[in-house]
Amino acid sequence: MSTFFSREVQAGLDAARLAALKKSSRLRVLADDEIHPVLRLWRDGFAVEAETTPPLRGLVDLYDGTRHLYQCLIVASGQAGGELRYEFKRSTVAADAAPLDFYRDPGAPVALLGARRVD
């Protein structure tokens, strides 16, 4: 059995699918000081809406709400179904602290308390 939809019905279904993806996703991409919603994210890339997002390239930052997830170097991989798809050339997990240049003993105390002096 095959199913055929007219162009108008298919366009309506695509628009409804994109609206549902935009509403359910908290993911955002920051490129050139502009924020664009991410429709889908997978291991090797992500997709954004083709109509509202200008072509992206180079270094971008991916966020989940306000939490910085990745800093990525991207390339465009294609367009289908109203989505622009991008692949990662490099994807680095964002850290909230600078890396240590020394070994920190896991059993070391967090802080040292000074001795109380009684005069």
Image (cartoon, rainbow, N blue to C red):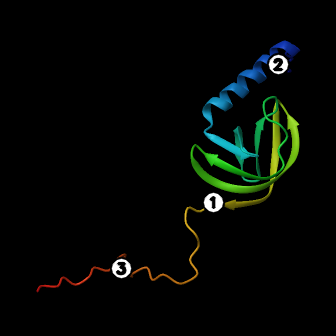
Q: Residue at x 67, y 31 (%)?
A: 22
Residue 83, percent from left and from top: 81, 34
| Residue 19 left/right relative to 6 | left
Distance of label 1 from label 3 (alpha carbons):
27 Å
Residue 21, percent from left and from top: 67, 31
- Above-or-below relation of 27 to 2: below
Q: Quadrant of the C terminus?
A: bottom left
Q: Residue at x 70, y 46 (%)?
A: 30
Q: Secondary structure at mark 2?
A: helix
CB contact under 8 Å: marks 2 and 3:
no
Which is more toward the observer, 70 or 111? Answer: 111
Q: Which mark is residue 69?
A: none
Q: The residue under label 2 is which amino acid type? A: Gln
Tell me the quarter of the picture where residue 51 sits: top right
- Above-or-below relation of 17 to 33: above
Residue at which label 1 appears: 94
Q: Earlier in the sequence, mark 2 or mark 3?
A: 2
Viewer-nearest of labels 2 and 1? 1
Q: Earlier in the sequence, mark 1 or mark 3?
A: 1
Residue at which label 2 appears: 10
Q: The residue under label 3 is which amino acid type? A: Pro
Q: The residue under label 1 is which amino acid type? A: Ala
Residue at which label 3 appears: 109
Q: Residue at x 77, y 17 (%)?
A: 12
Residue 112, percent from left and from top: 32, 80
